[in-house]
Image (spheres, helix red, strand yellow):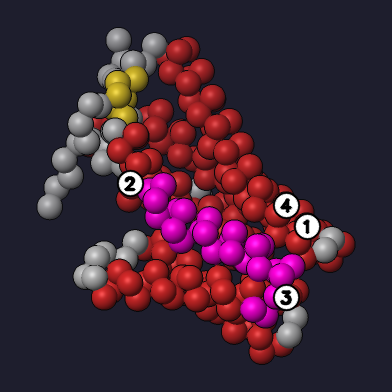
């Protein structure tokens, strides 16, 4: 019998992350799309930015922790809005995250031969795996494959995004892009998990779901 792989409490992680995603990503996107046809591009950008800044300001004023995702989203939105307002070009506004996607894809790819897959680093930042699970050879294979596939899907995502940007309307671009990002992410993680599950079955490695999060060293 192979040593088990212990998975931390995923539900707790999802419950913790979901409000931050809604607050930092979903609401600004809905505000931008909703106001785009009503008041035009410039004001739609300012409304979305206003929400993000108000979110940070409210949390600071009430002495609540500002989630990292909200901070990163706000900083990115500030940079994109300034660029769009300065140039008057929505191409500049929407091309910036596409460039980021390309850089992320290349980073995932480069991290593999360096011996430290980026997917592994990100996972360990979120999930408190125990030491035995971290050192399990199947976990290493999983993160290498995930990093490789994430690199590929990021580059595909960027290619489709550029095509949409130069061939479709702004509204169509925003709506399709909002679906494209999560779809490629689900495909990347989902297909890798299917491989991982099949590998566990072939090797007879048990998978244990922890009822409590594994404590991490201070």
Q: Are the residues at dot 4 and dot 3 in contact (C-beta closer than 8 Å)?
A: no
Residue range highlighted in magenta = 16-43
Classify 10 Å Cα crowding around label 2: few (below 14), some (14-19), many (20 and above): few
Say which residue label 3 marks.
40
Q: CA distance from mark 4 to mark 3?
A: 19 Å
Counting from the top left corner in percent of width and height, residue 73 is at 48, 66
Locate residue 66: give its quadrant.
bottom left
**Residue displayed at 26% across by 75% down:** 61
* Disc 4 crowd, CA 10 A, few/some/many (<14, 14-19, 20+): some
Residue 217 colored magenta? no
Disc 4 target residue = 176
Question: CA separation, marks 1 and 2?
Answer: 31 Å
Residues marked 4 and 1 touching at CB (< 8 Å): yes
Dot 1 falls on a residue whose secondary structure is helix
Which x, y percent locates residue 70?
41, 64
Q: Earlier in the sequence, mark 3 or mark 1?
A: 3
Predominant SS along the magenta part: helix
Residue 171 in sight: yes
Q: Mark 2 highlights which residue?
A: 16
Q: Is residue 25 magenta?
A: yes
* Label pair 1/2, CB-CB below 8 angstroms: no
For image coordinates 41% across by 47% down, the residue present is 18
Q: Which residue is mark 1?
A: 172
Neighbourhood count class around disc 1 (C-alpha, 10 Å): few under 14, some 14–19, many 20 upward: some
As measured in the structure, the alpha-carbon distance from the residue carrying label 3 to the one carrying label 1 is 15 Å
Residue 175 rendering spot, x and y as whole percentages? 70, 54
At horizontal 41% and vertical 61% (from top left) the residue drawn is: 69
C-alpha distance separating marks 2 and 4:
27 Å
Q: Earlier in the sequence, mark 4 or mark 3?
A: 3
- Please state which of the two labelled residues, at mark 3 or mark 1, is closer to the viewer: 3
């Amino acid at each position: 019998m192979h040593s088990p792989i212990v998975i931390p409490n995923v539900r707790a992680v999802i419950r913790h992350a979901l409000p931050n995603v809604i607050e930092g990503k979903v609401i600004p996107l809905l505000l931008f799309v909703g106001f785009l046809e009503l008041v035009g591009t410039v004001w739609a950008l300012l409304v979305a930015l206003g929400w993000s800044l108000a979110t940070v300001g409210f949390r600071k004023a009430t002495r609540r922790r500002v989630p990292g995702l909200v901070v990163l989203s706000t900083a990115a939105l500030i940079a994109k809005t300034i660029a769009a307002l300065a140039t008057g070009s929505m191409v500049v506004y929407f091309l910036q995250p596409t460039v980021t996607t390309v850089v992320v894809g290349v980073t995932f790819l480069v991290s593999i031969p360096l011996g430290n897959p980026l997917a592994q680093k990100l996972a360990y930042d979120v999930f408190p795996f125990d030491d035995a699970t971290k050192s399990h050879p199947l976990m290493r294979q999983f993160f290498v494959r995930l990093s490789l596939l994430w690199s590929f899907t990021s580059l595909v995502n960027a290619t489709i995004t550029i095509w949409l940007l130069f061939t479709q309307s702004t509204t169509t671009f925003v709506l399709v892009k909002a679906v494209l990002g999560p779809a490629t992410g689900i495909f990347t993680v989902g297909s890798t998990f299917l491989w991982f599950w099949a590998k566990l079955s072939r090797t007879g490695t048990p998978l244990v779901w922890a009822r409590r999060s594994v404590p991490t060293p201070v």
